Image (tube, grey):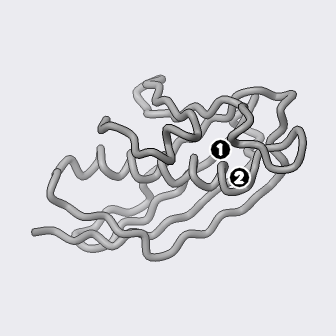
């Protein structure tokens, strides 16, 4: 995995390899708080976006391919709360073509089967 950009560092993101998959962890801390006791929606969206970018980057494995998000849709299903602790995210590539990739990312806290948010991101791939 590449060095994370400043926003990922602000979120406190770390990558964990678990069961052959790359999972991102975002700890609950003051920089990710929206209303008191809850995660900010932008922090959750950022976590989902980084998970999608990294999954796609690993699948492509070509350093010169430029990945540009074309559409991003985030569905918030429940509030991420301080009491549930860390937030995790993982992404699955639904389609990887020569010019377009479709990626789905999911975020959860204690139980992956109970997501707090999901995102669908369509990427334009520019190959040299």
Determine which of the numbered discs, if any, sits on residue 47 in the image.
Answer: none
The Cα–Cα distance between marks 1 and 2, rounded to whole angstroms, is 5 Å
> Is there a contact, CB below 8 Å, between mark 1 and mark 2?
yes
In the orientation shown, which residue stands out farthest toward the left?
A: 128
* Quadrant (top left, top right, bottom left, bottom right) of the C terminus: bottom left
Determine which of the numbered discs, if any, sits on residue 107 in the image.
Answer: 1
Say left or right for 126 vs 15: left
Classify mark 2: helix, strand or loop. Answer: strand
For label 2, count other residues whose C-alpha is less than 10 Å away and answer few (under 14), some (14-19) or many (20+). Answer: many
Q: Nearer the viewer, residue 5 or 122?
A: 5
Determine which of the numbered discs, if any, sits on residue 117 in the image.
Answer: 2
Residue at 61% from the left image edge and 69% from the top image edge: 73
Q: Number of marks in the image?
A: 2
Residue at 62% from the left image edge and 55% from the top image edge: 45
Q: Is residue 50 above or below residue 100?
A: above
Residue at 76% from the left image edge and 26% from the top image edge: 85
Q: Looking at the image, tell me whether mark 1 or mark 2 is earlier in sequence order.
A: 1
Residue 104 spot, x, y in % from top left: 53, 56
Q: Is residue 73 above or below residue 22?
A: below
Residue 69 spot, x, y in % from top left: 42, 69
For label 1, count other residues whose C-alpha is less than 10 Å away and answer few (under 14), some (14-19) or many (20+). Answer: many
Residue 47 spot, x, y in % from top left: 57, 46
Quadrant for residue 11, please give it.
Answer: top right
Classify mark 1: helix, strand or loop. Answer: strand
Residue 66 spot, x, y in % from top left: 24, 64
Q: Is residue 14 above or below residue 50?
A: above
Say left or right for 22 vs 43: left
Residue at 65% from the left image edge and 49% from the top image edge: 43
* Quadrant (top left, top right, bottom left, bottom right) of the N terminus: top left
Q: Nearer the viewer, residue 35 or 117?
A: 35
In the orientation shown, which residue stands out farthest toward the right?
A: 36
């Amino acid at each position: 995995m590449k060095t994370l950009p400043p926003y990922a560092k602000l979120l406190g993101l770390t990558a964990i390899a678990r069961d052959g998959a790359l999972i991102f962890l975002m700890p609950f801390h003051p920089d990710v708080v929206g209303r008191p006791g809850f995660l900010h929606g932008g922090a959750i969206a950022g976590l989902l976006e980084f998970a999608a970018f990294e999954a796609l980057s690993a699948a492509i494995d070509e350093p010169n391919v430029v990945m540009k998000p074309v559409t991003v849709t985030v569905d918030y299903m429940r509030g991420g709360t301080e009491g549930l602790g860390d937030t995790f995210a993982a992404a699955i590539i639904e389609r990887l073509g020569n010019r377009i990739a479709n990626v789905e990312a999911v975020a959860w806290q204690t139980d992956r089967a109970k997501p707090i948010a999901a995102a669908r991101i369509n990427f334009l791939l520019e190959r040299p």
